[in-house]
């Protein structure tokens, strides 16, 4: 029986990570494994360094808390392309963790072909994200050409003070704007 951690991520407020959990729990139960941790976040996969739960998951994997990582699909881990997914899969495998995707059933199969398939899945995720971005930009150009003004009204101000975020040497920092690090 394996110890399984589940990683769930959604990119927008209109999506619900809770939609992923029942099927992921069913996968764990059907295989007689034990669910030991659930990591969940609402962050864009392009916000590298801001996926706090993914960073926590990697630290727990390093400590040997689980030996399977189950996710809805590989693009939940990253949309930065094949290198990002391969790097994460290799890092986790060094810690004794096997990455399994509910949607990419081939991740359960043994063998060396998996590395090529992980690379292809990462490439597809990046291409899908880039196409979505291109469609959004084209829509913004069309709306602006129609004379619609985007953004806040002139002179509008924030109601609350904004926070500045950055990543230095893999460590997440947050501070109020206007203040030094």
Image (cartoon, rainbow, N blue to C red):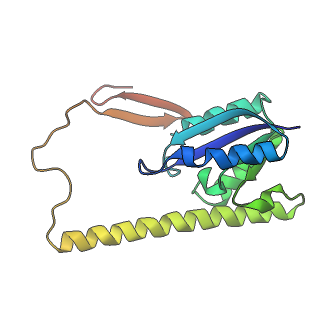
**Visible in this render: residue 120?**
yes
**Visible in this render: residue 49?**
no
Q: Write the residue at 36% across / 34% down.
A: 164
Q: Write the residue at 72% across / 61% down.
A: 104
Q: Position of residue 53 (x, y in %)?
A: 58, 36
Q: Position of residue 117 (x, y in %)?
A: 76, 65
Say whether residue 119 is left or right of residue 12: right
Q: Position of residue 110 (x, y in %)?
A: 89, 57
Say whether residue 81 is left or right of residue 64: left
Total of numbered circles in the picture?
A: 0
Figure check: 169 above or below 15:
above
Q: Write the residue at 29% across / 33% down.
A: 162
Figure check: 67 above or below 84:
above
Figure check: 119 above or below 169:
below
Quarter holding the N terminus is top right
Residue at the extreme left? 155
Q: Position of residue 108 (x, y in %)?
A: 82, 55
Quarter holding the C terminus is top left
Figure check: 148 above or below 62:
below
Say whether residue 28 is left or right of residue 180: right
Asked whether 101 or 152 is in front, the reply is 101
Q: Examine the image and state in which quarter residue 132 appears.
A: bottom left
Asked whether 1 or 141 is in front, the reply is 1
Q: Write the residue at 19% across / 33% down.
A: 159
Asked whether 85 or 173 is in front, the reply is 85
């Amino acid at each position: 029986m394996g110890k399984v951690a589940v990683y769930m991520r959604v990119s927008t407020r209109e999506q619900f990570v809770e939609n992923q959990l029942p099927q992921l729990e069913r996968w764990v139960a059907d295989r007689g494994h034990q669910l030991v941790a659930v990591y969940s976040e609402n962050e864009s996969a392009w916000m590298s360094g801001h996926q706090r739960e993914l960073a926590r998951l990697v630290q727990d994997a390093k400590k040997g808390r689980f030996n399977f990582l189950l996710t809805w699909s590989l693009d939940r881990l990253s949309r930065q392309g094949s290198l990002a997914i391969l790097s994460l899969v290799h890092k986790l495998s060094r810690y004794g963790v096997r990455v399994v995707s509910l949607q990419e059933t081939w991740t359960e199969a043994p063998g060396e072909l998996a590395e090529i398939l992980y690379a292809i899945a990462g490439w597809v995720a990046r291409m899908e994200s880039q196409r979505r971005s291109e469609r959004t930009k084209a829509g913004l150009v069309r709306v602006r050409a129609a004379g619609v003004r985007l953004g806040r009204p002139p002179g509008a101000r924030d109601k609350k003070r904004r926070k500045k975020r950055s990543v230095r040497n893999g460590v997440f920092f947050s501070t109020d704007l206007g203040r030094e690090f």
